[in-house]
Image (cartoon, rainbow, N blue to C red):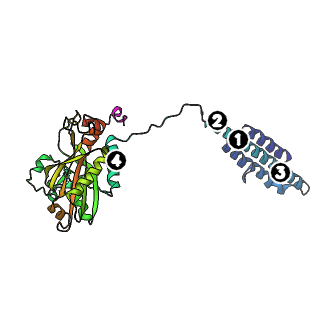
Amino acid sequence: MKTQLEQIRQAAKEVLETFETKEQIEEARIKYLGKKGELTAILKQMGKLSAEERPVIGQLANEIRADIEETIAKKSAEIKEKELERKLKEETIDVTMPGKEASLGHKHPLSIVLDEIKEIFMGMGFDVAEGPEVEYDYYNFEALNIPPDHPARDTQDTFYIEDNIVLRTQTSPVQIRFMENNKPPFRMIAPGRVFRSDAVDATHSPLFHQIEGLVVDKGVTMADLKGTLEAFAKRLYGEDTKIRLRPHHFPFTEPSCEIDVSCFKCGGKGCPMCKGEGWIEILGGGMVHPKVLKNGGIDPEEYSGFAFGIGLERLVMFRFNIDDMRLLYENDLRFLEQF
Ligand code: DAH
């Protein structure tokens, strides 16, 4: 039995020496020291031994068990350390390598100017509202005092989704939706995309952007419209900017006007930018038509208001001297990277 035990010790040590993985070590542990292992098998035969032999063999067996355990522990530690070394080597970072530069994006020119406009109006206490791009005929036309055969419909070549549903041709429908959901007094702007079935060229696109404005309160007059939009123009183009109102017609305002700013390039003397006029048209507006207030659920006897509509693309093109609107939509990086 002594020889058998010594053989086990010898074999275990030799085998363990050649092992290189945690799994192999575990296998060896089970093989030699496990409940069904070789050492246990021998110890089970201890009953056959004489009373003198038993403690001697017992002691030897324990010694061998401890010995093998120690070898296993040593070997495990060795493997762990090797593993760690390997990992460290694999995962080293060469800090002298050139880094990958994360390139920052640019704000789109439309966003640059829109953000400025929002900032200016928010500074004057305006809320920023939104409305759906797919809109009912009712909100886009009818409620804005544009009945079915009104000629204004012809000037806004409309994309129809269904008989009574359109892609909004203007941001003005947000006026009605806002009035339905808010009690005056209020001041709001509603920027967004609008759609018209126009052929693409240097100044037209089937998708473009407007910023609607609406102010309703008791006793609002044309003077408020003029003062507000003058303050806006000065903030956008500088303190020396002047504005002028020209009579115009919109179905949803009465009276209506178009508003020009003194040319921000030549200051009003006349140059290629303003085509020699000294003035550049930037928006349309007027006093909200009583019918429109009524359609929004507001009593025109009690309240009055002014509204305006700004075409964003025009402002952006003037601002950055862009002569072709298509550049704003083509997403050519050579163009966009300039902003
Ligand atoms: N909705 C008009 C358009 O698309 C622009 C406009 C003009 C809006 C006058 C207004 C306004 O709110 O008062 O041509």
Q: Which of the two marks, 2 or 3, is nearer to us in this view? A: 2
| Image-quadrant location for residue 103 | top left
Q: Report the amino acid beneath label 1.
A: Glu
Query: Which badge, 4 or 2, is on the more N-terminal residue?
Result: 2
Front in this rendered view, residue 228 or 26? 228
Q: To which residue does mark 2 refer?
A: 89
Residue at the spot 34% in from the left edge and 47% down from the top edge? 116
Measuring from the top left, give residue 138's x and y in whole percent: 16, 58
Horizontal side of residue 174 vs 90, given as left or right: left
Q: Nearer the viewer, mark 3 or mark 1?
A: 1
Q: Is residue 204 magenta?
A: no
Q: Is mark 4 on a helix, strand or loop?
A: helix
Counting residues from the N terminus, which is met first, the one under dot 3 or under dot 1?
3
- Residue 8 position, x and y percent, is 79, 44
Which numbered mark, 4 or 2, is in the foreground of this view? 4
Distance CA(mark 2)–CA(mark 1): 12 Å
Q: Which three-letter amino acid code belongs to the residue tagged 3?
A: Ala
Where is mark 1, residue-wise? 81
Q: Which mark is residue 116?
A: 4
> What stretch of residues is rendered in magenta?
329-339
**Residue at point 35% right, 36% down?**
336
Can you say which quadrant of the picture contains the C terminus? Answer: top left
Mark number, residue 61:
3
Contact, mark 3 vs mark 4 (Cβ under 8 Å) = no
Give above or below for 339 relative to 304. Answer: above
Residue 244, numbered circle: none
How many C-alpha atoms fall within 10 Å of the one at disc 1: few (<14), some, or many (≥20)? Answer: few
Does the beta carbon at disc 3 come under 8 Å from ligand 1?
Answer: no
- The residues tagged by marks 3 and 1 sit, at their Cα atoms, a distance apart of 30 Å
